[in-house]
Every structure is written in C-alpha cells, then in structure tokens.
Amino acid sequence: MVIQAKRALGTALFLLLPAAASLPGAPPERVYEPGRWGEARLVYVGEVPVLHLYGTPSRMGEAAGRLTGPVLRRLAPVFAKRFLDTFFGVIPVARKKPRERAVLELVRKAEAGIPKERMEEIRALARGAGVEADTILLANLLPEVAPRVHCSTLFLASSRMSDGAPAMGRNLDYPPIADIHRLGLVVVYHEKGRKALASFTFPGLVGVLSGMNEAGLCGATMDVYRNARKAFPGAIPRFLLYRELLSRWERVDQVIRAVRGVRALSGGNFMVVDARGDGAVLESPGDKWALRRPSRGALFATNYFRSSSLGGPHPCRRYSLLEAQVRKRKVFTPKILRGVLRMAALGPINVQCMVFRPAAGEVLFAFGRIPAAATTFHRLGRKDLFGRLQSPVSGPNPGTKGAKR
C-alpha cells in the first residue's frame, strides 16, 4: 500500500474529532447513531456507545466502518488542519516538513509488521466507512510512531481493596485535539477463534489502548519518552500486539511467556491484570522486555521505565504521587481509588478514565468531559460487554442512519 502523504496525513486522525462542544456538567453527547449491520450492533448502555462486532476480521472491519462511517466522513475534512497544527505545532518551522516526511516514511515501513488479519480489518473498515485505507492506516500508526500519550495506571490486589476484589485504575491522558474526549467508544470484538475483547477506544482504531477480555484479563498501555523512541520497522505495532495478547490469553503468566522474544515497532509500558488478582507491568523499548511485579499488593506505572535493565528508575511526579497514596493507606474503597486517579490525572488532557474489576468482569468508564477522572463513571457489566445481542436495536428499521453510505 502506498501512503498518499499529504491527503492521508490531513485526515489521519479523523477519529479524534467531535461534532460540537459539550456543555459543562452535561452527560456525553450521543455522537454515534445506534444501528446494525449484519450481526454487528451499535447500541448505548446508558450514555456509553458500545459497538459489538462479530466474525472474521474483514466482516468486523466493514461493520465498524458502516456503523461509524457517518461520523468519520463528516468530520475528516473539517478538522484536518487543526490536527496538523496541534500534532506538529511544537516543532520549529524549519524542522516541521522534514519531521512530517520522516514520520510518513516510518509509517510506510511499519506497514510490513501489521498482521495479515489486521490489515484485512483496516482495509474493510475503510471500505465500509467510505474513506481511504491509507487514512485508517495512518490513524492507527501515527499515535505510536509520534507519541503524545501521557498515562498512569494503578493495580490493587484483592488484599488492598475493601470489597476483596482486585482493581486496575487507568488514566488516558492525550491532547484533546478538537475535543477528542467526546468521542469515547467501546468496541467489543467477538472475533472468530478468539476471546471476546472490549476495547475502550475511539472510532477507526483497531489496536488496543485499554481493554478487557471475557476472562477478565485487562491491559493498558503507556508511552515512554526516554530510552524507548527507537522504532523497529517490520515489527508488530505495539497497540496491535496488545490486542493480540488480550484476545488470546486469560492469565498474566501466559502474557509474560507470550512476549518473550517478541519485537514491537516501538517501546512503552503495558500493565496487565487478570481475574485471579495477578498483575504485572511489562516494560519494553521494543526489542526486549523487563518485568515488574506488585509489592505489598500494589503496582503502578506512568511514562517512564522503572527497571534498572532499561535505564530506570526515572523520576516522575505522578509515579511518586501514586506511591505515596499506596503507602498512606492499607485498604482502598472503590471511591478512594477513583479519587487517587483524579489526583494523578493530567487535568487538561485527561480524556478517559476507567476502573477495571476483572473478577466481576465489569468496568467503570468516564469520558465526555475533561478531566474525565472528575466526571461520572458509567458502569459496564459483563453482560453489557460480552453478552451476545439476541434482538435488534429499538426502532422500526435499526441502522438506517448508522449504516448508510
């Protein structure tokens, strides 16, 4: 696939764009149209849009494109320049064009590492949405090869939670380009031959930033900015690797074994937690892995390596804050956990916040306002995420608006 540089780059992050500004204190605006296409359904659970996809990668991709296409097509041309100005705005003018060319060249080379089934899904998503496949490809790879994500995670074992159930809190901190916080979406992949996987994401992305599978295995990614910026073209993109891991395994120890010897396109941290209450942080510059385990029933991570084998530990204010809170109290209530996440959130860019409860198979998901950690958490239970929809969505002809080209 040949990257059509200027045109594709201009629309690459269409998935980060809203329809209108939200009112303070208001629930998230329903920017997606409920609908169905084949077995796929886009429904609302309370105020949360949940897109259920079934079958092969190609089938899932086309359904995702059909059901989110109206949003993607409408917003792409309007906000393209705003994305470019924001994304490359910190680069001096003299270096901006060379930097754009370098990033695009890296994206072109990175395509070789995308698994065949994910490329089928990307092409089908583009076809279903009526946009160029290069646009979807860039949207999935640009956040990895030119990272802007500042995140924090906190795992608490059952012994540290007042209700005796393990929990993983997660802040997704990303520049709110054109109000990205309003486009939160849960995509549930019921992929043939794999475990059902709920990805807390934005439309157009096929990789996983934050997710949980039907067995309760949870994962969340964090970019790392020191000792991790060398890319390995031809290796699997990191966000796609995380999807592979969460769609295949049930336990943390299985994930640890699975990544041995795996090279990723770029480096970062990945916290993984399972329903048994096990947890780990996998730190990687892309070509090797270091492992951190919980201490006294707690584990936390931000945007720096802590492992000495990777040049750590590097100082981080948010890491120190989480560490202090864990030392301060022996037991956390769910409410206190949410409060700690709010303390660690980078307010102006806190676009999503969530609490995973792997043993129960539920997630508390906050989005729609900034900082997300300070707004309403919406509960999504196991049935909401992994129960197969037996009946069509309400209305005489569900999907009429959501599925039209």
Image (spheres, helix red, strand yellow):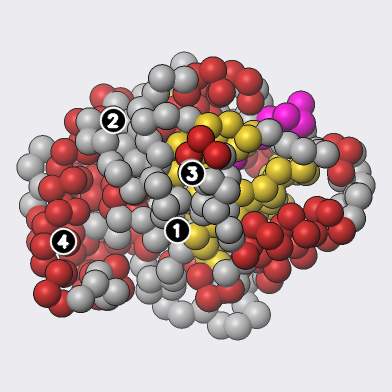
Q: Earlier in the sequence, mark 1 or mark 4?
A: 4
Nearer the N terminus, badge 3 or badge 2?
Answer: 2
Disc 1 to disc 2, C-alpha distance: 21 Å
For residue 131, above or below residue 1: below
* 310 w.r.t. 225: above or below: above
What residue do we see at 63% from left, 20% from top? 253
Q: Earlier in the sequence, mark 1 or mark 3?
A: 1
Q: Neighbour class for label 2 at 10 Å: few (<14), some, many (≥20)? A: many
- Real-space CA distance between mark 1 and mark 3, rounded to the nearest whole angstrom: 21 Å
Quadrant position of residue 252: top right
- The answer to whether the residue labelled 1 contacts the one labelled 3, judged by CB atoms less than 8 Å apart, is no
Mark-to-mark CA distance, 4 and 3: 29 Å
Q: Is residue 372 left or right of residue 12?
A: right
- Magenta range is 271-279
Q: How many marks?
A: 4
Tag 4: residue type? Glu
Is residue 97 one of those drawn in magenta? Answer: no
Residue designated by label 2: 235
Contact between labelled residues 3 and 4, with CB atoms less than 8 Å apart: no
